[in-house]
Image (cartoon, rainbow, N blue to C red):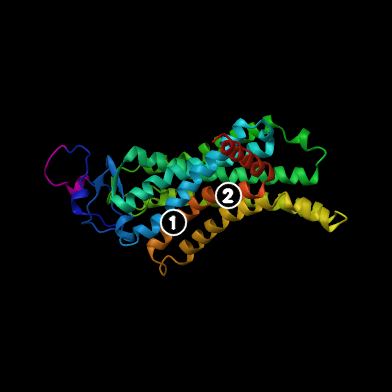
Amino acid sequence: MGLCPCNTLQYLSPIRSHAPMSPKALPPQDGRRSTSQLHLPTPHFLHTDWHSRVRGYQTWLTLVFGPMYLLALLGNGTLLALVQIDSTLQQPMFLLLATLAATDLGLATSIAPGLLAVMWLGPRPVPYGVCLAQMFFVHALTAVESGVLLAMACDRAVAVGRPLHYPLLITKARVGYAALALALKAVAIVVPFPLLVARFEYFRAKTIDHAYCAHMAVVELVVGNTQANNLYGLALSLAVSGIDILGIAGSYGLIAHTVLRLPTWEARAKAFGTCSSHICVILAFYVPGLFSYLTHRFGRHTIPKPVHILLSNIYLLLPPALNPLIYGVRTKQIRDRLLETFTFRKSQL
């Protein structure tokens, strides 16, 4: 897909002979490919190359993605530490928030270091197995985050609609089971991604025109029938995002029905205020994703490829950076605990 210096396109897989590869050794060609096209065996290394696309803009992009990753590390790490050390925050709502923070931390760490390295150091050799592992973790953690947002929407629906039954319906044990179920579901539905890619034996090139090993970016390099990869990727995106969005919409439909039945405006504002942080987090996750999908779907031939890659990176890094800020500012318990911690440390100096 991407451009790369010729000396970096050497495959490290063992070769039995130094003679040119015989056309008979190549897999069957379909009618759309040139018969003179060189097909290479599965490489030991792939290269991620976004450097050539953003040459001259590294400083500006570093000022965007660097602070995003730093906020994701510090913000989510702080939230996890607060929930761990403060027993008053070990309640179902905050345990769901801790699950979201851990997911964000993993998602940002799966992408940002490699992204920054590619921008400044050029094409990076990535072991083929590591590339498949990164593909799995990026897609699995994205699926987990979408599921956690659905679980948090259900939590808010119960808190607003059945406040007296909330302690009985939403317990710490059930939150733990829900987190485990989300992780197992993500593993089950995402494992086919690397398996479907690993079945291919020949590649057209070994340079990925992306900042990380995205599923479709790797699929575009392989030689063979990729219809199963395309169909499974599309079906999985529609199923996971569609079901989660429908569930979130249904939960907030129940919340709106309950809030509108309250007698006073003050009571409605207070009830709706308990959901405001979650609404902001949902918008931070789904709006960039929807925008990235629409530009890729309808602007493939009009919008430059670097813009598509930029939007994809923003979609994956913006929520981990914003989520701890949203909950840290808008959630009173977390805000008060942070102020107490900093005030205590300042008094000790």
Residue 249's spot in the image, x, y percent?
68, 53
The chief SS type of the magenta part is loop
Verify CB contact (< 8 Å) between mark 1 and mark 2. no
Q: Secondary structure at mark 1?
A: helix
Residue 274's spot in the image, x, y percent?
73, 49
Q: Secondary structure at mark 2?
A: helix
Q: Looking at the image, which is closer to me, 259 or 129? A: 259
Residue 11's spot in the image, x, y percent?
22, 44
Quick one: which residue is furthest to the left in this view?
A: 19
Q: Is residue 237 above or below residue 103?
A: below
Residue position for label 2: 325
Q: CA distance from mark 1 to mark 2?
A: 16 Å
Q: Is residue 249 visible?
A: yes
| Callout 1 amino acid | Val
Give the label on residue 110, or none.
Answer: none
Residue at 23% x, 56% y is 35
Residue at 80% x, 55% y is 268
Q: Is residue 32 visible?
A: no
Residue range (magenta): 16-25
Quick one: which residue is furthest to the right in this view?
A: 263
Residue at 44% x, 42% y is 109
Q: Looking at the image, which is closer to me, 226 or 244? A: 244
Q: Is residue 92 above or below residue 28?
A: above
Residue 101 left/right relative to 25:
right
- Image quarter of the C terminus: top right
Residue 169's spot in the image, x, y percent?
76, 35
| Callout 2 amino acid | Leu
Residue 299 is one of the magenta-drawn residues:
no
Q: Is residue 290 above or below residue 157?
A: below
Residue position for label 1: 64
Q: Looking at the image, which is closer to me, 345 or 84? A: 345
- Image quarter of the N terminus: bottom left
